[in-house]
Image (cartoon, rainbow, N blue to C red):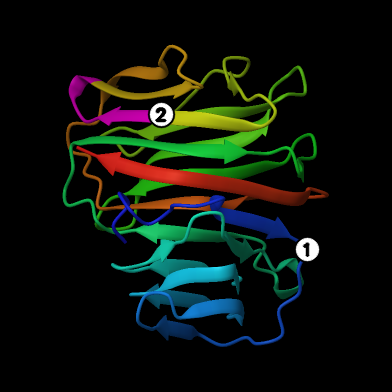
Amino acid sequence: MNPQSATVGAYGLEVRVGDECSSPDTLSLSAPPGQIQGDFEACFTLTAENVEVMGAGATFRSGGTIQLGDGFSVASNVDFTAAIVPALGTDFASVDDPSPIAEVVYNATFYLRLDDLVLATGDSIEHFTAYSGSGESQFILTVRKNPSGQNSLHLAARENGGGLVQMIPGQELPLTTAWNKIDIEWTAGDGNGAFLVAVNDGSFSGLTNLSNSAALVETVRWGAINGSISTTTGLMQLDSFNSWR
């Protein structure tokens, strides 16, 4: 999808936990802009290209990945919903952006609201991840509770040797109620690579001095990608995704 224009409206992606899905099939949507609204179910994969969500909005129920192609957009004040389907054993839903091409510098900004998510202590949701062309994760942003019980962001980044460098427990970036603005800066380097995040226009912090010069970003995934969920319920609301070199 074109991340510069793909999410305009009340929220770009809302991830629900606990909805049912009755159609375990792959679903593809392609229509002139302004043509779709309603409820679309696809428990495995849903692909939407050249589609503008209009009217009351559209609910895409998917137990796997939702891929949004060029020409996808959401009209102002219209809801776009992606539903998680735990009953199928696929508890997560996310959207892919394949527009990065062998990036060694990657920046993104988006909004996240967790007021309606009841995240159980000890549970974690992989929320925003970048991948190389081989599908190996290059950096991972995870939602979890910090030692104080507050919803927070945890950072991890891969180095040349293949291992992940993790944020030290207790240094997670706390999230507030209502909408949180998330800014991401990732750079590949030889001892000077970095994965930094700022919340609500605060200072950037995270992982520095990384030896990740061989890392390349080819795809990013956003939403509820993976994780460890026991009794977590509710929904994640996302909006206004933009990325650049």
- The picture places residue 93, in percent across and down from the top left corner, at 57, 61
Upstream in sequence: badge 2 or badge 1 = 1
Mark 2, secondary structure of its residue: strand
Q: How many marks?
A: 2
**In this figure, which residue is indicated by the disc labeled 2?**
183
Residue stretch in magenta: 183-192
Task: Report whether 132 appears left or right of 121.
Answer: left
Q: Quadrant of the C terminus?
A: top left
| Labels 2 and 1 touching (C-beta < 8 A) | no
**In this figure, which residue is indicated by the disc labeled 1?**
18
Task: Report whether 139 appears left or right of 200.
Answer: left
Q: Label 2 neighbourhood size at 10 Å, few (<14), some (14-19), many (20+)?
A: many
**Residue 211, picture quadrant:** top left
**Residue 38, picture quadrant:** bottom right
**Residue 6, picture quadrant:** bottom left
- The picture places residue 43, in percent across and down from the top left corner, at 61, 78
In this rendering, the answer to whether 53 lies above or below 225 is below
245 in the magenta segment:
no
Q: Amino acid at mark 2?
A: Asp
